Image (cartoon, rainbow, N blue to C red):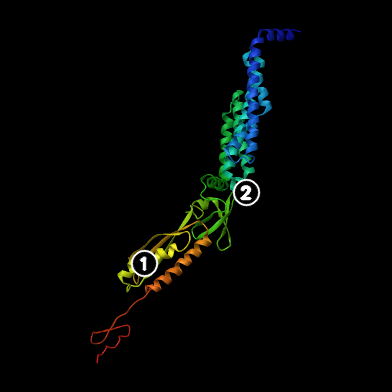
Amino acid sequence: MDKVNSLSRWLTQNSDALLIGTLVAIGLVGLMLIARAVGHKMIDRDPRCVGWSGVIGRVLTKTSLVFMAIAAIDIVLNYADPPARIARLSNIAFTVAFALQAAVWGRELILGVIGTRAGERPGDTAVGNAMGVIRVLVSVAVFAIALVVILDNLGVNVTALVAGLGIGGIAIGLAAQGIFSDLFAALSILFDKPFRRGDTIRFDTTTGTVEKIGLKTTRLVSVTGEAVIMANTKLLEREIRNLAGGSDRQETLRFGLTYQTSPAKLEAVPALARAAVESQPGCHLQRCVMTAFGPSSLDHDLVFRHEGLDQDHLFQAKAAIILDLLRRFAAEEIEFAYPTQTTFTAAPDGTLVMPYAVPPPVTTM
């Protein structure tokens, strides 16, 4: 009977504070419910959560009704002057609920950010393929932090627990060093994006199309048809050329002309090269210049750009340019050089024996 009277007296003495606290709690819960509804609408506009609106919407929809109720009760009691035991229980409940809710928000935000990097199709990237494993790792990490926060707020000495978790993490990291190095390499590929699935890349002497970016390895199909499997860590240590980058390609044709070519004909070479290159759709001459006096030729570089990334079309255009150059040079009697060596031999009397037939002198009548 005394407890009933004490409760009635407390309610009477704090009626105004309880009313204000209740209104504030209702307003806060209402805002959280509105935020959840907005989150559902954002997800409806981005069902796969590949954009920031979908990520934020997924975080908002994870607000728990239990957390709302506990937060509302704690707000109401904070406006009043409850008994110490009730206030203590309310604070503990709110601490536990808020830590767990923050862990859920943090997990969804981290996974959402990773998901936006993974792309629309989960099988396209290492993270998309390993999303289940990453979800487990992220969940363990954020809920472990939440547990430490809860225990610390409850007055438990968490120093030994944190030290134990740190030592255990170091031991696990050393035991699985190779796996984690490849995993972080996969994440580096994901965020830095040196290449994506479907890109054609070249490293060392290998050229191939990226078929799958896995958790530990990247798989390619080489231009000769073989499957090439490369560890992510080893792959990133190499110089990678992404042939899918940019909007066009630059090609260089090197050729040599004979030393017997006259200066006038050499001056006409750039114009002939431009006509040959620009006769092909999407090809533009960058330069055609004589670069050096070679051992047996006057060396030239012809550089042109080809619009688009279609390798087959590029090879066809390159072959057509070479054939056109052959025709134009033949019409102008410009000869291509090939490696030659001329040997001069001396006769016993010291005169040179020419390595080619000398025409007889022309006699006039």
Residue 202 position in % (x across, y down): 50, 57
Question: Which amino acid is tagged 2?
Answer: Gly
Q: Is residue 121 left or right of residue 205?
A: right
Q: Residues within 10 Å of mark 2 (few under 14, many from 20)?
A: some
Q: Quadrant of residue 295?
A: bottom left
Residue found at the very far left of the displayed protein = 349
Q: Is residue 198 left or right of residue 67?
A: left
Exactly how many numbered labels are in the figure?
A: 2
Residue wearing tag 1: 269
Q: Mark yes or no: residue 90 visible.
A: no
Residue found at the very far bottom of the displayed protein = 365
Q: Earlier in the sequence, mark 2 or mark 1?
A: 2
Q: CA distance from mark 2 to mark 1?
A: 52 Å
Q: Nearer the viewer, residue 82 or 66?
A: 66
Residue 293 position in % (x across, y down): 32, 67
Question: Which amino acid is tagged 1?
Answer: Val
Residue 20 position in % (x across, y down): 63, 14
Q: Mark yes or no: residue 209 visible.
A: yes
